[in-house]
């Protein structure tokens, strides 16, 4: 088993240092040196390093970060905004919180460097409402950074100026979707908008806007310090670098663990999770947050934690939320809870999502409570399929994918229950 050595970690090497959230501690670990280096380079050279690194967004979609930055029309004459997505609401995902609470200056340094690269002078961190502790820590860190001259006018004597503002959301999953986030930040209902135009061209206040995830931005200082090529040495194929994986469910040691991409999933669960709790048998693994289709035990034994392997098994690395499901856990109950979540969080703009999420939940609830009809299997499939690719944003797909995935890979458990008509138990 080849694991990432602790000293090679990119995001969490210093994470256990006491008081790392204070600026003096962060500076003592070499913090803000990458910013100094970045300011000595041209903006295009910073973008070039990020492109070379092969870094792909860690918010879920995995879009290449350097490429996204180069879509910004730098000559439009309009202000350019950089928004840090700290909404982290996908069930099974809790990695950004670790950075926000334990190493806020890493994120702030990443934001300042990124803002320099994309010619932005006003940036916002949009943090989910429930992260009250993280918000307090970030707010204090921002104040410290202003006092030290890392934020504000002419940062470290350069021509670059940046104001950074923390904005607390009110606790809506949809505000994690980038255009929903933008609407919310504009003071409107957090409802997504049709793309194109993409935010890079027309986003916040109709100006060019880059939206990046917390983990994505926190990776930038390392890339600038060590170079894009050094970053690309980590990982495999199209999956460069390391990732913060969130491990939850029926394991002995749930938590957030940084690993190099490409590691076998079984090794990850065994080593970091300490294996299955109580020696239970594995039933399934959700690999990338609750909206990603599951893996069967057979697939788990072959899968590696990278984009291509997940594609091979019809699923995604998503937001890095690995949920381990034991044999004794009812998939009906799991699907009832998941469908309820997406129904509750749908913003209601698009009919397939507003109605579809409700129907999926109603059917799963009926099945789980022993009132399932044989035709429900097909009805679930039809409803879920009608929700794929038919709406403004991907929440609808996110709700449909786990249902379709579980029906496809675990049909027997669901069908047996429809016949028996008994109530599922945990
Ligand atoms: C329904 C929905 C919820 C999302 N929630 C989040 C979130 O909480 N955090 C996040 O970074 N990205 C989230 N995303 C993805 C964002 O729309 C966007 O792709 C991401 O912030 C871009 O940053 P990245 O390129 O650094 O990954 C969500 C997408 C959808 C469709």
Image (cartoon, rainbow, N blue to C red):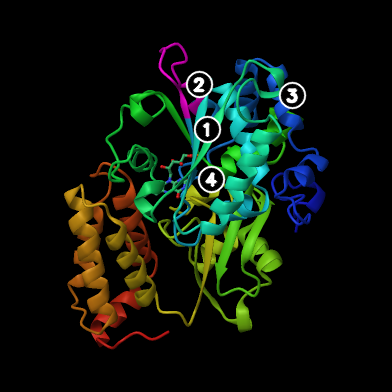
Task: Determine the secondary structure under disc 1.
Answer: loop
Camera-near label (1 vs 3) is: 3
- The residue at which mark 1 appears reads as 64
Tell me how far mark 4 sits from mark 1, CA to CA: 13 Å
Task: Determine the secondary structure under disc 2.
Answer: helix
Quarter of the image holding residue 164?
A: top right
Residue at the spot x=60%, y=27% of the render?
Answer: 152
Tell me how far mark 4 sits from mark 2, CA to CA: 23 Å
Q: Few, some or many C-alpha atoms within 10 Å of disc 1 (few <14, some 14-19, many ≥20)?
A: some
Residue 79 is covered by the magenta coloring: yes
Q: Few, some or many C-alpha atoms within 10 Å of disc 4 (few <14, some 14-19, many ≥20)?
A: many
First reached walking from the N terminus: tag 1 or tag 3: 3
First reached walking from the N terminus: tag 4 or tag 2: 2
Observer-nearest of 52 and 314:
52
- The answer to whether the residues at label 4 and label 1 have Cβ atoms under 8 Å apart is no
Observer-nearest of 347 and 383:
347
The label number, if any, that marks residue 37 in the structure image: 3
Residue 166 at what x, y percent from top left?
A: 51, 42
Magenta range is 68-81
| Ligand 1 lies under 8 Å from the Cβ of mark 2 | no
Magenta-highlighted stretch: main secondary structure?
Answer: loop
- The residue at which mark 4 appears reads as 307
The label number, if any, that marks residue 70 in the structure image: 2
Camera-near label (4 vs 2) is: 2
Camera-near label (4 vs 1) is: 1
- The answer to whether the residues at label 1 and label 2 have Cβ atoms under 8 Å apart is no
- Is residue 409 visible in the rendered image? The answer is yes
């Amino acid at each position: 088993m080849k694991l990432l050595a602790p000293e090679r970690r990119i995001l969490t090497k210093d994470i256990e240092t006491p008081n790392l959230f204070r600026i003096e501690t962060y500076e003592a670990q070499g913090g803000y040196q990458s910013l100094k280096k970045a300011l000595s380079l041209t903006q295009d050279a910073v973008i070039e390093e990020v492109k070379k690194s092969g870094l792909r967004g860690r918010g879920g979609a995995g879009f290449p970060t350097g490429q996204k930055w180069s879509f910004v029309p730098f000559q439009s004459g309009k202000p350019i905004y950089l928004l840090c997505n700290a909404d982290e609401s996908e069930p099974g995902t809790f990695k950004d919180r670790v950075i926000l609470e334990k190493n806020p200056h890493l994120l702030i340094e990443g934001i300042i460097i990124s803002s320099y690269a994309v010619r932005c002078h006003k940036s916002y961190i949009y943090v989910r409402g429930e992260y009250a502790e993280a918000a307090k820590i970030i707010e204090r860190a921002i104040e410290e950074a202003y006092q030290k001259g890392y934020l504000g006018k002419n940062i470290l004597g350069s021509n670059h100026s940046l104001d950074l503002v923390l904005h607390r959301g009110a606790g809506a999953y949809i505000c994690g979707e980038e255009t929903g986030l933008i609407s919310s930040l504009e003071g409107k209902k957090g409802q997504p908008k049709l793309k194109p135009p993409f935010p890079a061209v027309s986003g916040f206040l109709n100006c060019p806007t880059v939206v990046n995830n917390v983990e994505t931005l926190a990776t930038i200082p390392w890339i600038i310090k060590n170079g894009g090529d050094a970053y690309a040495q980590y990982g495999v194929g199209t999956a460069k670098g390391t990732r913060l994986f969130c491990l939850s469910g029926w394991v002995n040691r749930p938590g957030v663990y940084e690993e190099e991409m490409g590691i076998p999933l079984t090794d990850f669960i065994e080593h970091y999770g300490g294996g299955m709790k109580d020696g239970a048998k594995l039933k399934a693994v959700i690999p990338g947050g609750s909206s990603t289709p599951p893996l069967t035990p057979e697939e788990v034994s072959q899968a590696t934690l990278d984009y291509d392997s997940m594609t091979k098994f019809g699923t995604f690395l998503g937001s890095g939320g690995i949920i381990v499901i034991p044999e004794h856990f009812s998939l009906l109950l799991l699907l009832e809870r998941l469908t309820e979540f997406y129904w509750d969080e749908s913003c209601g703009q698009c009919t397939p999502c507003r109605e579809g999420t409700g129907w999926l939940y109603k059917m799963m609830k009926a099945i789980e409570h022993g009132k399932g009809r044989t035709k429900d299997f097909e009805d679930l499939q039809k409803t879920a399929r009608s929700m794929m690719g038919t709406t403004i944003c991907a929440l609808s797909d996110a709700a449909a994918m786990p249902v379709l995935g579980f029906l496809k890979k675990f049909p027997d458990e669901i069908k047996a229950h429809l016949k028996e008509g008994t109530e599922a138990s945990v």
